[in-house]
Image (cartoon, grey):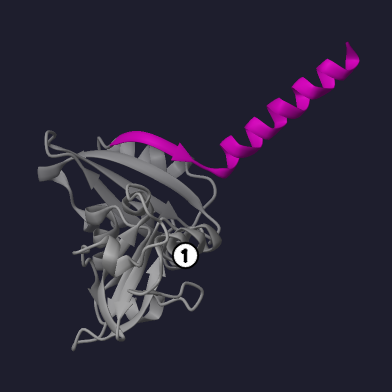
Amino acid sequence: MIAKDLITDEIPPLTHTDTGDIALRWMDEFKVSHLPVLKNGNFVGVISESDILDKMDMDETLDVLFDHLPRPYVFENDHIYEVLFKVSEHKISVVPILDKDEKYLGCTSVHQLLSMIATTGSIKENGAILVLEINQVDYSLAQIAQIVESNNARILSSYIMSSPDSTKLEVTLKINKTELTSIIRTFERYDYVISASFQKSQFYDDIQERYDSLLNFLKM
C-alpha cells in the first residue's frame, strides 16, 4: 500500500491567512493535534496545537504568528512504512502527501493509518498470536514458517521488534489457527523461546473462570 491510497477527505488543510484560533478549533473538530498549512495552494508546513498555544495572540494569522514551519511529508508513491516512519520521527498526528512536483494532494491521519494496518496486517482475520524471542544471528523466517506449516497452519502476518542494546529479536506471528498447543510444542522442540501466546483456549478459559466466579458470587 502506498501513500496516495491513504489520503482522507475528512481533514482539510489550513491556509496561511487562517488565525490561530481557527486552527485550534479545526484541530478540536477533526480530533488531531496537527494540520497542514497551504499558501497560494502550496504546502508550507505543518502546524501543531502546542505551537499555537505558545503564542499570545490567537487572532493573528498563521503567517504572522510563524516565520517558519516544519515540513514533514511523504510522496504519493511512498510505501505505508515510510508514512509510519514520518509519524514516529516527527511525532505528528497527520502526514501531508505530495506529488513528485511537491504539489499538495491531501493528508492522512494516525487514525486512518491504524485502520488500514488493521486490515492489511490480517488483524481482523480469525487466528491466534505467538511471540518468539530469538537471537538475531539465529533468525530465519523460512524456518519459522516451516515449523508453522508443518502443523497444517500458515502465518497471516509477522513483525519484528529489536532494541539497540540487545542481541535479541521479538518476533510476533499471527497464525490462522485459534489453538496453538501443537505449534508451541514444535517450536520448543527446536529450542525456540516462547515469550507469549494469545489464543482461543486461553480466552475461553478466562471467560469461563469469570463466569464461574460470578455464579459463586450470586450464590453467596
Around disc 1, counting alpha carbons within 10 Å, would you say few (fewer than 14), some (14 to 19), or many (20 or more)?
some
Q: Quadrant of residue 117?
A: bottom left
Classify the position of the C terminus by image quarter: top right
What percent of the width, then of the height, locates residue 128?
Answer: 49, 49
Whether residue 92 is in magenta: the answer is no
Question: Residue drawn at (35%, 49%), measured in percent from left and top?
Answer: 56
Classify the position of the N terminus by image quarter: bottom left
Above-or-below relation of 175 to 4: above
Q: Is residue 88 something that shows in the picture?
A: yes
In the image, farthest residue toward the top? 220
Most foreground residue, 40 or 215: 40
Above-or-below relation of 100 to 219: below
Q: Is residue 111 something that shows in the picture?
A: no
What percent of the width, then of the height, locates residue 72?
Answer: 22, 66
- Side of 216 where 37 appears, left or right: left
> Badge 1 is on which residue?
22
In the image, farthest residue toward the right? 219
Q: Quadrant of residue 217?
A: top right
Per the rendered image, the range of residues in magenta is: 193-220
- Side of 113 where 128 appears, left or right: right
| SS of the residue under disc 1 | helix
What percent of the width, then of the height, locates residue 137?
Answer: 10, 44
Which SS type dominates the magenta stretch? helix
Question: Residue drawn at (58%, 44%), measured in percent from left and top?
Answer: 200
What percent of the width, then of the height, locates residue 55?
Answer: 33, 50
Question: Residue drawn at (40%, 35%), measured in percent from left and top?
Answer: 196
Whether residue 196 is in magenta: the answer is yes
- Side of 13 where 166 appears, left or right: left
Most foreground residue, 109 or 62: 62
**Amino acid under label 1?**
Ile
